[in-house]
Image (spheres, coloured by chain):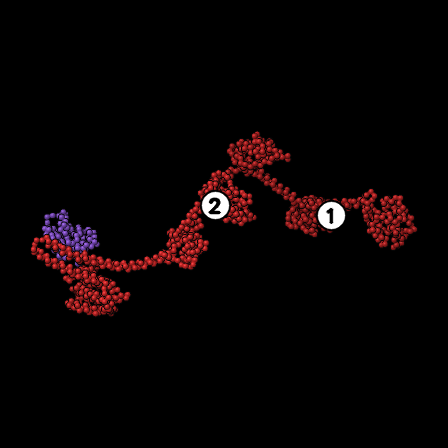
Amino acid sequence: MSKTPKICIIDDDYIYRYTVVKKMENMRLDAKTLDFEDGEEALNYITDHLDSDTELPDVIFLDIDMPVMDGFQFLKEFDKIRHQLKKKISIYMISSSLDPIDIDRAKRANEICDYFVKPIKTEQLELVFTQLKAS
Amino acid sequence: MEKSTEKAESKIPYHKIFIEQAPTTIVMLDKNMHCIAASQRWIKEYNLQGVEIVGSSYYDLFPKISKSSKEVHQKCLTEGVNTTDEASFMNKSGKVKWLHWEIFPWFISEGEVGGLFINTIDITPQKENELKKERTEDIFAQTKEVARLGTWEISLTDNKVYWSKITREIHEIQDEYTPSLEEAINFFEEKYSRPRLSAHIQDAIEKKISFDLNFELITAKGNRRWVRVIGKPEIIDGQFKSVVGLVQDISDVTFSKLELNKAHAQLRSIFNSNHNVIFSTGESGFIDHFNKGAERLLGYSAEEMIGKKTPADFLPLEEVKKFKYDVATLIGKSPANFNHYSDITYEELSDTREWNYIRKDGTSVPVQATVSNLRNDEGINIGFTVVATDISRLKKIERRLVIKNERLNYAEQLTKISNWRYKPYTGETFHSKNLLRILEIENSSTMLTFEDFLSYIHPEDRESVVTHNEESVVNKEFKNYTHRIITAKGNIKIINNIGEVVLNTEGNVVELIGTAQDVTELKMAEKKFKGLLESAPDAMVIINSSGYIQLTNKQTEHLFQFTSEELLDQPVSKIIPQEILPLSKKNISSFFNGSKVKQLGITEPLFGIRKTGQKIPVQINMAPLQTEEGTLVSLAVRDITKQKAAQRKIIKAKENLEILAKTLTDKNQQLADFTHITSHNLRAPVSNLNSLLDIYKTTDSKILRESLFDKFEMVINHLTTTLNTLVETLKIKSEHNEDDIADIKFKQVLHRTEEILAGEILKSGARITADFSECQVIRYHTIYLKSIFLNLISNAIKYRSEERTLELEIKSMTVNGKIMLQFKDNGLGIDLEKHGNKLFGLNKVFHRHPEAKGVGLFLTKSQVEAMGGTITATSQVDVGTTFTINFN
């Protein structure tokens, strides 16, 4: 994959979104980022760009706890439009919750690639990029 | 006479001469009984030759004259009448003389007796005849008695019938009875005897024909007897005056004769019978009789056999040899060269055995034959008679019987039953082979006597068995009983005897019949069952289908305090008063309906009653029990007094636990809420701080580092707010102070809230209506209630619809004694299907409203729940939301 990957961050926490972008810059990981405050905004964007290879993200960092539409609700809706997508989108669920109920529920959702606990670590970001290149 | 008497005195000498010359024995006496004259015959008769008779006194001549004779003489002299006298006397030669005297007077003048004439007639021959006749009659009478000879006489002059004593006895009629001729004849059998007798008597009377015949008489008492009647006309002095006769009872003789005739007829019919084979041999050994039955069975004709063949021609040699051997042995002679004709002399032989006769066609037929010898008057054997019966059919039946008997034996072996018969008066016994097997006697051909059997009976039971037997005979009833035996091998077994007493028509005991069954295993099983019953931890009660107690165990006695005897045959309701079985139902098994056990007293209370009347809670396991006597029901009764007490304790504990669980659930929920808050609302800013710090450390850019401080400030402010909210929540959840509680008027709280929110209400133009008519005052936490009003009203304003004026209705209610408060708006509404579970969560925001922080409802819920109430919401997107608080 030669193209610069597009990474979508769905999280209502502005500071978190900021730290992820800055961390990637520090690690010199070349990526375009898109950010949404809740699941609904992200879903609307994806629905609007179903056919656009360039507009659709390669990776989604999805928060659980969000207003209006939370991470699980987003996954449910995303699953409905998945088959219409032009490209494969890898979803990583990233939450500050250490609640085992949340972790278990996230891991059981087959739409996601992995579950990371905030703050996201360097190695985890590297893994995301490695897997992206491999696919 | 008178004329001659007149001339008597003058003519005495003439008289005298006349008398002396008279041919009769006569003497003439004067009035003084002195002889005047006597005939020569008189002198000769009295042997008075040479004796001076004339002038002698008559009494001097015959000094032995009796006084009575003298009186006769005097009577004649005085009354002048003729008399007679009679006397016997012995003469000198010792011979008895019978004399008859005719005494008549002679007259001197009319009316004057001159003396007597005594004319002597010797009647000795007549007298002797008379005596002889009397004697004969006497003997005859005695003979009649012995020979049962009765006499009768029909007098022809008056047609009267005379019957002797014996005759009356034969007729079985009383002594005084005198019949007429017709009546006499009517005693005879009507059909044959009466007309015959009648005719013969007629002939006797009319034609003087005698008869001697047998007739059948029916006595006055209705008995039939045969009599021989002899009748003959009696002619006396040439005159036919009567018919006399004899009657003799000959019943015994006649009946014997009849029997003989009958027997003879029977014998003839037997001899002529087709079914019996009868033949006989003479001295020579040749057959002299060969009946139809013999012809039929053997295929030889009588002509072929009689005088031509001997029985050896159709008897198997071996059987003849055996017969000769047995006969010789029987009569105590040497079997060697024994000849059953000449060697049997005085012995009477009657041998019955089975033979196989060989027919003319060579086939053989089994017969049972009785061989008897014939003897002449001297008792010498003059041949044999043989009566034989074809027993081929019997043999077949016998074979079948043998097979059946074998099967019976087998069945008896399997069931360990033996059948027996015992005749108490003869001591005869019969028993099936299996009895020997039961007794473990190896030699299985012996037939045991009653005494033999007794010897196998256990010594302790022997007397009772004998007694039982005797009682059976006396009472004519056999009661089933059980006794022990010691077998030939020394094993003790238990025998059950079932039997009955056979009576004859007179009601006398003929025999006892019955079966003896080895019930050792059954008894052992019964013992095991009883042992099991006794060891059962529950009170076991076995009842029959009518609900009567049949068996109980020790535990039953313990539980109900009745003894087993007190319970036996009592209705089960004595200890379990409630109806546990549908006893009206005939079929118990249908009650159980396939299921093995029914449990009672599990859900419904069930009680047992002790002897003392004390009630005890019980549980019953009930099961049908199939036995020989029908379906029984076993009840396992368990005292559950302790369980009941324990149950009450458990229920109490359970109730306490439920309260505890409720509290714990509440606490747990609060803890979960707290966990959620810490994991989301506290961890997020902390992780942000970490991330920012990480960026700060790794960057060299000064500009970036400075800009990072703004971010740090933002995160720290957020964290502070969150922590403040949490602290407040924790305060709510902790125990509140009694001083915070007061009676508060809803109206007042609403008023205060409206004052606080006056600006926003004004700006939004919201219309708030309130109805506290149902409940105006509540005793509640003052600060919480104010907070609840503030949060819910500000929420309503915050999430109002832009398209319509907010209308908020607040209403207090009392439902089931509980105070409720309702806030109903016409705002944006929430999709509760999506967000329902998060509605009251901390920092949960459902609208992109700048002021939405997700704190208000979280606090409201905490406050309501801290006071023991609940808050719920119903909502419809773009219609409105209703919050309902149940203050409880």
- Residue hosting label 1: B242
Q: Which chain is red?
A: B
Q: Residue furthest right?
A: B10
The kind of secondary structure element at disc 1 is strand
Q: Upstream in the sequence, badge 2 or badge 1?
A: 1
Residues at marks 2 and 1 on the same chain: yes
Element on which disc 2 rests: strand
Circle number at residue B484: 2
x and y, in percent, of residue B98 in the image: 81, 46
Q: Nearer the viewer, mark 2 or mark 1?
A: 2
Which image quadrant: the C terminus of chain B? bottom left
Q: Closest to the observer: B720 or B113?
A: B720
The count of marks equals 2
Q: Is residue A2 shown left or right of residue B275?
A: left
Asked if residue B119 can be seen in this view, the reply is no
User: Callout 2: 10 Å neighbours few (<14), some, many (20+)?
Assistant: many
B129 vs B384: above or below: below
Horizontal side of B656 relative to B262 (left or right) equals left
Q: Residue at 54% of width from left, 33% of height from top?
A: B322
Considering depth in this image, is B783 or B818 the residue closer to the camera?
B783
Give x and y (percent) for residue B805: 17, 66
- Which amino acid type corresponds to the residue marked 2 in the rendered image? Arg
Q: Say if residue B94 shows up in the picture.
A: yes
Q: Position of residue B360 (x, y in %)?
A: 53, 32
| Chain letter corresponding to the colour purple | A
The Cα atoms of the two marked residues, 2 and 1, are separated by: 89 Å
- The chain carrying label 1 is B
Residue at coordinates 85% horizontally, 44% vertically from top-left?
Answer: B45
Amino acid of disc 1: Ser
In this view, B863 is above or below B700:
below
